[in-house]
Structure formats: structure tokens, C-alpha cells
Amino acid sequence: MSPATTESEQPRRVLMLTHTGRDEARQVALACFKALISHGIVVRMLAEEVAELGLVVGAQDGLEVVEGSDAAGADCELALVIGGDGTILRAVEVTHASRTPVLGVNLGHVGFLAEAEVEDVESTIDAIVAKRYHAEERVTLDVRVFHGRDEIFRTFALNEASVEKAARERMLEVVVEIDGRPLSRWGCDGVVCATPTGSTAYNFSAGGPVVWPAVEALLMVPISAHALFARPLVVAPTSVLAIEMMAGAAGTGVLWCDGRRAVDLPVGARIEVTRGDAPVRLVRLHEAPFTDRLVAKFGLSVEGWRGASERRRKGSL
């Protein structure tokens, strides 16, 4: 009998999503697939990825194929993602409804959302098989766009929702609002609303602060704003952030969420951002401090650091 099942329970299932445009990712995905099914774990994949990996439907036990992504994560204990942060954000989009935990294996550059590097694949598979992992909840954003009294768009974001100018030569004219009260008017290239998880992404590039993931807060950062008061803001997780595009302004805008979903913003549009009702669950294999992750991902120099324990030891001599 397979070690992954008993007579009284359903087989374990893992959804696997891959950046199939990269040869290395395809090779890693195939190795993960073979390793997981060898332990009796069913691997679910999107139909198009099955074809791109060269697998034949019906010719391999342990392979489960779904045509669409809407319910792809249902009944899966986790989603194993082979790729960079962009692929992980795609997985977050696919699994948002089912709230399936996401485990990223980084084949990208920085890979802040990933838990493992490509050289850790073997130990990652061992951890999945032995269930040596836990899910960490991350704050998300609910994003709504209004035009007049009508809601014209609604979505979510894990990293950020950014309002950006649609034309290079035209600035946006916006008024920003916090908790129902106007704060300032900006002529700018855009405004980023981010989560702590997204603080190391677009928010970071725009000059916003790095916020530890355990902090519950929302962030707002203007992009190239022409105003006296145009500083990054950190507000309560219960706050409502709003960006109103001025009715008489010449510049139009576009809303981007996690760099994946976009909608054109008509003049006079209002964008409201609140804490999301459904957090994203990221799989963690070990308890690594966020400080260590920052040092590793950004290649920060810590030369000369001795630490409190070393100072205390020397002080006791």
C-alpha cells in the first residue's frame, strides 16, 4: 500500500505549477513529479502545462489533469510552484479561491516569495512527503474601482495595487484619502498601495519602507510626486486607502494588481484599497528570521557583526 494513503482516506494531492518557458524549470518539475508520485502523492497539473512538459495523459499513474484554473487548487494540500516570483504570483491567483497553501521553489532572481532554492529540491520533496511544513498567513488587499456610483472592477493583490499613468508624457492628478478624509493632492507618475509582503517588491523600488511580514499594516507610496507632502505612508490594517483621479485632469491611468491584472482607469475614477478578507497562505519549511532572508536575497554585507551573545560572553570574562 502506498505510504501516502490508507484504506480509509483519499490520496494526498499536490497542485504543481511551472514556468514552462524555461528549460531548467521543466527539468525540475519533471523530477518533482516523479519523486512525488513515487511516494503515492497525486500530482495535479493544468492541461497546458502537462502538454508543455511532454507528459501523456493516461500513460502515467499519479497524474491528475484539470482544464481550467478556477478550481485547480481544490482538495490539494499545497501548490508546489517551480519558477520565480512571477510564477508564484500566478499560483496565488490560481489558488486564491481555494486558499491552498503555496510553496515556491525559486528559479528566478531575487525570489522573495519562494521558500526554497533549486538546489534544495530533494529536501523540499522530503519535507512535503513527511508533512514537515507549516502555512504562514499573509495580508492581502481587496481592490475596487468606482466610476460615479458604479463599481466597474474588483480584484485582490498579495504584493501591491498600483495606479499608474497611462501615457508617458502625462502626469496623473490625484487626491489621496485615508479613512474617509482627504490627505493631499499629488501630480505624480503613480501611487503604490502595498502589503508588508509586497514591501520588498514595487514598494521598495518606489522608495517605500521594508516592513516585516508579521506587521499588520497597509502602505501607500507616491511615485515621482510633485508635492511638498509626498512621503511613504504606513497606516493601520483597518484603514481604507482611496485614490481619486481628478475629473478635469488630462492624464488617464491604469490599475495594476501584482503586475498581472490590469484595468484602464477613466478620468474621475476612484480606487479603494482595504485589507483583504482572505489572506494568502505561504508554505514555510523552517523558521528562518526575515532579517536573514533580507540579507540573503539582497546580498547585504554584515561583516564585523558579533551579536549580543558574543558581547555578553566577552563581558563575563
Image: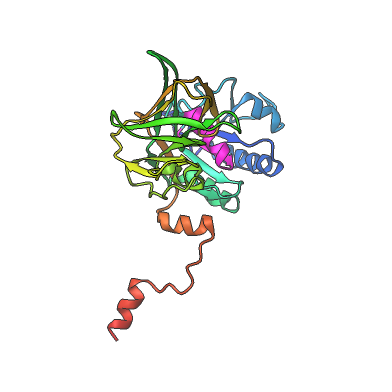
Is residue 33 toward the left or the right of residue 257 in the image? right
Where is residue 40? Give x, y as percent.
54, 36
Q: Quadrant of residue 32?
A: top right
Q: Residue at x 42, y 46 (%)?
A: 133
Front-most of residues 82 and 162: 162
Front-most of residues 155 and 11: 155
Measured along the vertical axis of the image, is residue 202 above or below residue 278?
Answer: below
Front-most of residues 214 and 171: 171
Where is residue 317? Give x, y as percent.
29, 86
Is residue 107 toward the left or the right of residue 217 in the image? right
Measured along the vertical axis of the image, is residue 312 above or below residue 150?
Answer: below
Q: Residue at x 58, y 31 (%)?
A: 62
Q: Is residue 131 magenta?
A: no
Where is residue 253? Give x, y as percent.
52, 27
The residue at the far bottom in this view is 317
Residue 288 visible, this angle: no
Magenta residues, as a range? 77-95
Measured along the vertical axis of the image, is residue 145 above or below residue 240?
Answer: above
Colour scheme: rainbow
Q: How many marks?
A: 0
Residue 123 visible, this angle: yes
Q: Is residue 81 magenta?
A: yes
Where is residue 190? Give x, y as percent.
49, 35
Is residue 95 toward the left or the right of residue 278 in the image? right
Is residue 280 toward the left or the right of residue 87 in the image? left
